[in-house]
Amino acid sequence: MSRAFVKETDDAGEPLPELAISAQPNFVTPAGLAQIEARVAVLEGELRAARTAGDKSLQKRVERDLRYWTQRRASARVVPPAAVAPDVVRFGVRVTLRFDDGEERTFKLVGEDEADPAGGLVSWAAPLGRALAGMSPGDEVAVAGRTAEIVALSPQ
């Protein structure tokens, strides 16, 4: 029988959708760039291992993730930390907020890929990051239905 009419099977499964690349500029802190580079290195190792093991499904997933992180590394725009205490909120600045109940929270505005809200790292492109940008100590901002005053800014 001719092989022309036999469907070749691909044990890698369904094609994976590409990871969405943000339309925002890819601003990163120096630490954020290091995180991206570390992720690329890990994925390159995982890709070698998947190829060695012949795991096509894993290989496709890792190749997709590697395309994303390689593109993020290529488009990264490192923003150096401020040398002096800033007078307005901007990328890379640590902001301390005091809520109307007296609770204080501190956030640092970072790149989209390095954001970790639970760890106090908020993307500059997130609603909170956008709301804080350009504000100064003494200004008030709405945060998750609450009001907070900016009480301090620091470069780190």
Image (cartoon, grey):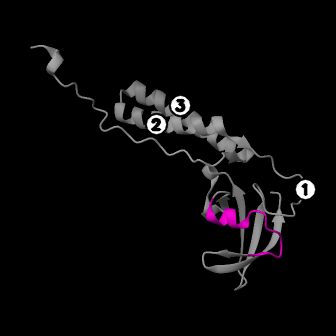
Q: Nearer the viewer, residue 4 or 107?
A: 4
**Quadrant location of residue 26?**
top right
14 with respect to 64 (left or right):
left
- In space, the residues marked 1 and 2 are separated at their CA atoms by 40 Å
Q: Nearer the viewer, residue 78 or 101?
A: 78
Residue 6 place in picture, x, y as percent: 16, 22
Q: Nearer the viewer, mark 2 or mark 3?
A: 2
Q: Is residue 151 left or right of residue 14?
A: right
Q: Secondary structure at mark 2?
A: helix
- Which comes before the other along the chain, label 3 or label 1? 3
For the residue labelled by badge 3, is the local secondary structure a helix, a strand or a loop? Answer: helix
Q: Which mark is residue 64?
A: 2
* Labelled disc at residue 44: 3
Query: Which residue lies under the disc numbered 1?
Result: 84
Report if the CB atoms under discs 3 and 1 are less than 8 Å apart: no
Q: Residue at x 82, y 65 (%)?
A: 153
**Few, some or many C-alpha atoms within 10 Å of disc 1 (few <14, some 14-19, many ≥20)?**
few
Which residue is at 72% across, 78% downward?
Answer: 148
| Residue farthest bottom in this picture | 101
Assess whether residue 22 is covered by the magenta stretch: no
Q: Residue furthest left?
A: 1
Hey, what amino acid is under mark 1? Val
CA separation in Å, label 3 and label 1: 38 Å
Whether 138 is among the magenta residues is: yes
